[in-house]
Amino acid sequence: MSMDMTFLGTGSAYPSPHRGASALVLRTDGECWLFDCGEGTQTQLMKSQLRAGRITKVFISHLHGDHLFGLPGLLCTVSLNTNPDVHQSLKCVDIYGPRGLRKFLRVTLGLTGSQLLFPYGVHELEPTPDQCPEEGQLSLEMVEESSPPHPQEQPGRTIPLDNSTDSYLLFQDNKFVVKAFRLYHRIPSFGFCIQEHDRPGKLKTELLKELGVKPGPVYGRLKAGESVVLENGRLLLPSEVLEANIPGRKICVLGDCSSVLGVGACRLCNGADVLVHEATLGNEHQEKAVEHGHSTPQMAAAVARACCAQRLVLYHFSQRYKPSSLQKEGDEDDVSELKNQAEQALLDSGVEVTLAEDFMTIPIPLRKPPAIKV
Ligand SMILES: [Zn+2]
Ligand SMILES: [Zn+2]
């Protein structure tokens, strides 16, 4: 199954002509999952190779506008382009995010009289009080849903923190388990971990031949993990004829933060193929970054190192950092310096550092089966 990630916006605070506000799409088998949706995301989508109509799930890390202001507009445009006669396009769009997101959509879609042709459901994560300073916490009155649901709003879940794992289980299906974890920011912020299930290793066809098992449906059953009784009465276990499992891929996307909170993040992100972390300002501005709830490349690198990630992708740059292609000689605030800073902090760790740019696509190749010990 192919998998890749496309950055639609890599700037912080607001969209600019050279950097969109936060948004990225993880694509798996033609399905698109959108992570954050800053203002202007829909036009960024139109400029990309991706199709907004393919978005089936949306994950909002936190309620700051540079991660959210684009969502009502995007939903309306997807609806305008929806063919009501095509049954498939009317699938429910599942939206995950912090408490308050359901009300935000209900009020913005309701007050603007926005009609949608497809149903949507909002599943809210309950933050804990230690995720932000006191002034960043939403009061009960602020998140109270006093207005009636939008006609297309489906009942959504409220997901509390699972204290035993320090994480939130968003959903699992036959391909993925998706969980969230807590971050510290000026308002409650979350990271998301997409864990693909391991897949069975190759069949040992030579061995099967020796056992007299001919290719056919039996091969499929063994590969699917079923035990099979052979004609001679012998019970054949899948583990006897399958090579080691191919480990599933793991992608972690962190919202704005000046630190992770608790043990959930590092447990979940351990060994991530790709860890996407913000780096709003350079190391020399660390004090200012932390004051605003943000990270520097060095801080992002420390998280990647603690999680033994294979690749660290930096994004959410202050708009003072122009993309490398627009950088002129003598310009201050060179974005490539952010990469150097992360690399410096990751010397000898084996973690690869990438600076995300708008419209950059990163393929996430299948993992290799574990090496056979001789
Ligand atoms: Zn932000
Ligand atoms: Zn923020």
Image (tube, rainbow, N blue to C red):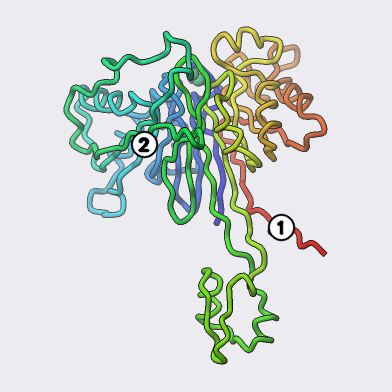
Q: Which residue is mark 1?
A: 370
Which residue shows up at 57% across the image and 8% down it? Answer: 291
- Distance, label 1 to label 2, CA atoms, is 35 Å
49 or 374: nearer the viewer: 374
As shown in the figure, which amino acid type bears the numbered disc 1?
Pro
Residue closest to the far front: 164
27 or 246: nearer the viewer: 246
Mark 1 surroundings: few (<14), some (14-19) or many (≥20) residues within 10 A: few
Mark 2 surroundings: few (<14), some (14-19) or many (≥20) residues within 10 A: many
Lower position in the chain sequence, tag 1 or tag 2:
2
- On the rendered image, what quadrant is the N terminus found in? bottom right
Horizontal and vertical percent for residue 57?
40, 41
- On the rendered image, what quadrant is the C terminus found in? bottom right
Residue closest to the far bottom: 232
Which residue shows up at 56% across the image and 53% down it? Answer: 2
Q: Is residue 323 left or right of residue 61?
A: right
Element type at mark 1? loop
Which residue shows up at 61% across the image and 47% down it? Answer: 364
Q: Is ligand 2 within 8 Å of the beta carbon of the residue shown at mark 2? A: no
Q: Exactly how many numbered labels are in the figure?
A: 2
Element type at mark 2? strand
21 or 204: nearer the viewer: 204
Horizontal and vertical percent for residue 75?
32, 35
Which is more foreground, mark 1 or mark 2?
1
Horizontal and vertical percent for residue 63?
41, 22
Is label 1 in contact with label 2 (beta carbons under 8 Å)?
Answer: no
As shown in the figure, which amino acid type bears the numbered disc 2?
Ile
Horizontal and vertical percent for residue 131?
48, 19
161 or 213: nearer the viewer: 161
Q: Which residue is mark 2?
A: 95
Quarter of the image where one finds residue 273: top right
Does residue 113 appear in this view? yes
